[in-house]
Image: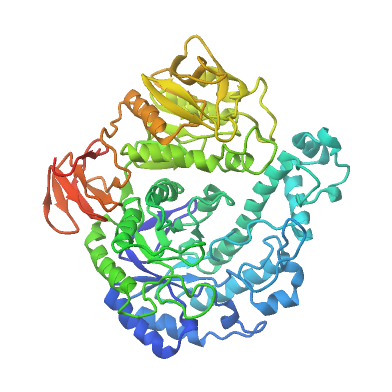
Amino acid sequence: MTQHRDDERVREVRIDALAFGGDYNPDQWSEETWHEDIRLMKEAGVTMVSLPIFSWPQLEPEPGVYDWGWLDRVLDLLHAAGIRIDLATATATPPSWLLRAHPEMGPWDAEGRRLEFGSRQTYCPSSPIWRENVARMTRAMAERYGEHPGLAMWHISNEYGDHVSRCWCSESSRHFRRWLADRYGDLDGLNEAWGVNVWGQRYTSWDHIEVPRTAPGPINPTQLLDFERFSSDAMLELFQLEIDVLREVTPDIAVTTNFMSMFRDLDYWDFAAREDIVTDDAYPEPADPASHVGAALNYGLMRSLKGGRPWLLLESSASATSWRDVNVPKAPGKIRVESLQAVAHGSDSVMFFQWRQARYGQEKFHSSMLGHRGERSRSFQETKALGNELKRLEQVRGTRVRSRVALVVDWDSWWGSSAVESLPSQRLQWADQARAWHRAMHTLGHAVDAVRAAGPFEEYDVVVVPNLYIADQAQADAMRAFVENGGHVVVGPFSGVVDATEKVHEGGAPGPLRDLLGIEVDEQWPLADGVVERAFYDGDTIDVPCWAEWIEADADVEVRGVHASGVLEGRPAITRRTVGSGSAWYVSTMLEPEGMLTVFRDVLRSAGLPARRHVDVDAEAVTRTDGTTDYTFLLNHGTAPVAFALPASGVDLLTGADAAGVVELGGYGAAVIASPHAASVPFISLTAPNE
């Protein structure tokens, strides 16, 4: 069994196979259909399903009156078939009778309008009535099913924050005031933190503070930042409430809640610390030929949230989704390669939303494992083949991804650089920077982990920091120690600008990072829309769109790139400083993709790491290991053939064939090469097909 440890004890996810299956909604179907479902699940190799996520109204049709019989029968059928159960607490959304009895627990938007029942997540996270009923329902589920032999783990709520991640009601304001009092102690502390002498915003009573609803003009940026923090914490309190009940009633059962990949609204570092295993819902856009690159960034975060432990892909799509403006289906073969990508990046599962495609409701056009045509549907044929193929990868379960590169993911900087209007430019967005920097490392052949801004960094050779708008001394000290001990850190533009209360650091950017980087930012220099300047870098000319900075560099700083046009022509653009046995880089500009590759090739060379000479964004190689055997996943996300050069021979687990030298894969092809564990992370270069 795969084991997962938190600060208290070890809890096992009770499944002895790679988890394969999806969300199951038996309450939408007849009991006759349940038996057909079980037959087809066994045929497809299903090992786990998630239920009953949205079934509170069916389980408690009126207050205090429960109807457990149908769920009892379903769970027993699944268990008898050997299918494990990711059992939801059924608290993802309130039943209508609860909201109608207590309309005050409904959420409000920023304009002060109460949102109506008729969708899902129609609740205020701060509502004491909602919390009381959530705890009651969770306890009822735990007491009823906590000893069921089919139970693999608890699935708390569902996709926290998907529809309501912030609430602007009066209860939220009361909760916000309590949160602020805990954070700042008294009004003097709050007034100091919020810089209220600007625009006459001093508070003389806690009762005067409200959540930041729509106002006549720009809102205090520190108030906005604190509201982001508070809103994430309010949802975290709701999560912890259910954890506490489950820990009391079923202390040996692992708990999780399904994340939504790189999701802005909730600080997943905090959420992951409370649960036993990280789970994720991932929906790469089929219409985007490079969506797998963003998926790799998301998966790097998922495996890193609990220190590199395996995680579970709990939802994905068998083909088209139902919630995009245009819902493009997945081409034949993409289901397989995208699923194997998740496993490559540390997932011990491949699961879908959902098992049987709905005939009614908001998601009736969302693809499923078993499509509207039943077992004749393409999605069933492809997922059935995938489920049986995954059985060949059982030995990969429990292994960890090998990586020497990490990317700093910091929710404070994400919120601070995107929540307010009064910034030098709205074009420099944390998420866009993170994706661009990750894409460069990914394209050059490296799997990228995620880390907090204060580390730990010791497992890595290179740490990239696309943006750290909010920075403190502890983070700067951790980065300096990393560099002095031989690490290489690369810091992006608009970093070290403000402290945790949105005050500009003394002396300006990069604030506490100044002594490490050896530069000062005299002035941010955003470019007008449509303007693209240029820079010289190591003999190449690279494009600089949207953002630049006027920087001054110390005498011991090597200027690696200079501006080649515009007002900043001749001034430093990209710098490198040797500190101890490592180096600290500063990239003061935004760069186009080719420019990013040029710079990061240089960074990797400086760190003694390889980089692909021949690049193909469709070609991906990721290695998992158990310390004895390396399992290298070779994936082709495109339709044209790609060729991988293996550093060591091995066996392809998917075919059983020996693999050595060059492995060529056709469109949407995949191979999983098992080879003896190598001392250094295996690096897979590319060659031209048939070369």
- Indicate the colouring scheme: rainbow
Q: x, y (%) of residue 642? A: 22, 46
The residue positioned 73% from the left and 62% from the top of the image is 108
Instruction: Answer left or right for 669 relative to 503.
Output: left
**Is residue 380 left or right of 31 when viewed as pictured?**
left
Front position in the image: 480 or 240: 480
User: In which quarter of the view is residue 368 placed?
Assistant: bottom left
Horizontal relation, residue 66 to residue 657: left or right: right
Name the quadrant containing residue 356: bottom left
x and y percent of residue 630 in the render?
Answer: 23, 46
- Residue 46 seen in the current view: no
Residue 283, relative to residue 217: is it above or below? below
User: Which residue shows up at 68% across the image and 50% down it?
Assistant: 230
The foreground one among 670 and 503 is 670
Tell me if residue 122 can be seen. yes
Q: Report the number of discs.
A: 0
Q: Residue at x 71, y 43 (%)?
A: 183
Residue extending farthest to the front is 530
Q: Depth check: give the residue in front, 456 or 126.
A: 126
Figure check: 503 above or below 255: above
Q: Residue furthest right?
A: 204
Q: Is residue 466 above or below residue 358?
A: above
Q: Give the image location of residue 313, x and y in percent.
A: 40, 59
Q: Is residue 3 above or below residue 68?
A: above
Q: Indicate the position of residue 312 as horizontal and vertical percent values.
A: 40, 59
83 sits left or right of 140 in the view: left
Q: Quadrant of the N terminus?
A: bottom left
Q: Residue furthest top?
A: 555
Q: Quadrant of the C terminus?
A: top left
Q: Residue furthest bottom?
A: 32
